[in-house]
Amino acid sequence: MANIAIDVRRVNHFGFGTYLRNILRSLARLDQINRYLLVGWDDNGGEELPANFVPIPYRVSERSPRNIYALHLLLRRHRAQVFHVPHYHWIPQSLPCPYVVTIHDLVEFIYPPGRRSQWLSASMFSLVRRSLRGAARLVAVSHATRRDLMRVFAIPPERVDVVYNGIDERFLQGHASEAERQFIAERYAIHYPFILYAGRVQRHKNIEKLIEAFAALKAELNKLGVYTDLKLIIIGDELSKHPHLRRTVIRSRIENDVRFLGFVPIESLRIFYDVAKVFAFPSRYEGFGMPPLEAMAHGTPVVTSNTSSLPEVVDQAALLVNPENVFDIMRGLRQALLDAPARERLKALGYRQVQQFSWDDAARRMIQIYGETADAHAPRNHALTLA
């Protein structure tokens, strides 16, 4: 048995929280031997934990200078043998045990925010590089992210393990019922076919070009006299936060054909995936790219980019397009919408592709990594084993 500490302070956040919640559930199912110290665990809605999962209240902010000293004491007091940091957004220093870092993407270095000063960018790069080089093990969520680590931070390849994410179980509940479809129609006033985008609304997500591609597609469909009532639905941040997207819609003259729905809970999102004619995800960069797999789990044809991790994740189960070429995106959308044999092929391949990604598989590999890390730094420790 070993004491494995995991920083869960962001367990209720979007993104990192999704990763933490799913990996913890699978660890709880698979491992009754090792002791897991959940650093920063709150009540979390009264979710029950196995006896070997120990919630440790810890409300010190990652950004607080006190975090360095307080976390050191906490890990020492609980005799942690490995500490898992599920992101690189704070810098472990002077820890009393080896640490493992999960890297989801390097978007902040590949597509840095425009408002960040050169000094701040250089400082962040230096701090993150020191953090990554000090880690006992690095875990990348895709081979593309592993290559990014090697290229951006000159990390030796042998120091990086690839552990794929899985699919949230709520997207694996089968197709939406007629009652659920009716709920979406009434709740969101959707009584027309639509192409769907779901995800964050950020510069590298390439939503402007998606809107332009949809405008080109609408013009062609109107000429053909098919799908003349087709809409584009964008689920993500509120449109008010991104006025440039409103300007793109107006410039493209499709104000009545694009809807921004803001945040949608997973229970409703899975129905949107099910009802959509096509799922479009022409992102310029993804560390893993979960939404295309979520759409595939519902049998929806996917059009996504031929860059970063996306070809690795979707394999042959999606239509790949050049995210910088509006007409190539339009071509993919048109084929996925109108080519019936292609739709059936993508549907079958998508179901099969989803089976390649499992949180239980990810948890088994993480247990292995925890054990190897603990043993490497404390040879007398017993190896971690699966129950």
Image: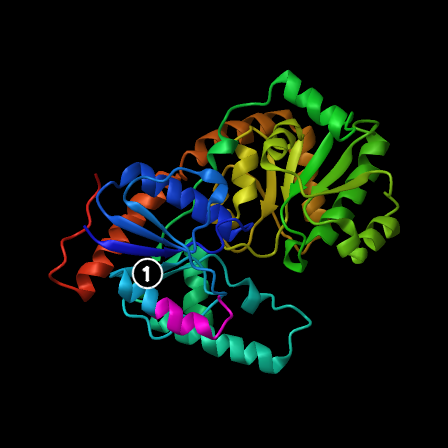
Region of the chain picked out in magenta, as a range: 62-72
Q: Does 167 appear above or below 64?
A: above
**Residue 145 x, y percent position in the rendering:** 45, 59
The residue lying furthest to the left in this view is 380
Classify residue 279 as left or right of residue 386. Answer: right
Residue 156 in view: no
The residue lying furthest to the top in this view is 178
**Residue 60 x, y percent position in the rendering:** 47, 65
In the image, 177 versus 83, the foreground residue is 83
Quadrant housing residue 140: bottom left
Q: Does 132 appear above or below 83?
A: below
Name the element at disc 1: strand
Q: Amino acid at mark 1?
A: Phe
Task: Report the residue at 84% width, 39% height from top.
Answer: 219
Task: Report the residue at 50% width, 65% height from top.
Answer: 61
Magenta-colored segment: predominant secondary structure: helix
**Residue 30 x, y percent position in the rendering:** 29, 38
Report the quarter where the C terminus lies. top left
Q: Does 99 appear above or below 259?
A: below
Q: Disc count in the image?
A: 1
Quadrant housing residue 70: bottom left
Read off the residue under disc 1: 83
In the image, 74 versus 169, the foreground residue is 74
Category of crowding for the residue at label 1, using alpha-carbon neighbours closer than 10 angstroms: few (below 14), some (14–19), many (at least 20): many
Task: Report the residue at 22% width, 60% height from top.
Answer: 374
In the image, 373 versus 54, the foreground residue is 54
Residue 183 in view: yes
Magenta highlight on residue 66 = yes
Magenta highlight on residue 155 = no
The residue lying furthest to the bottom in this view is 119
**Residue 320 x, y percent position in the rendering:** 58, 45
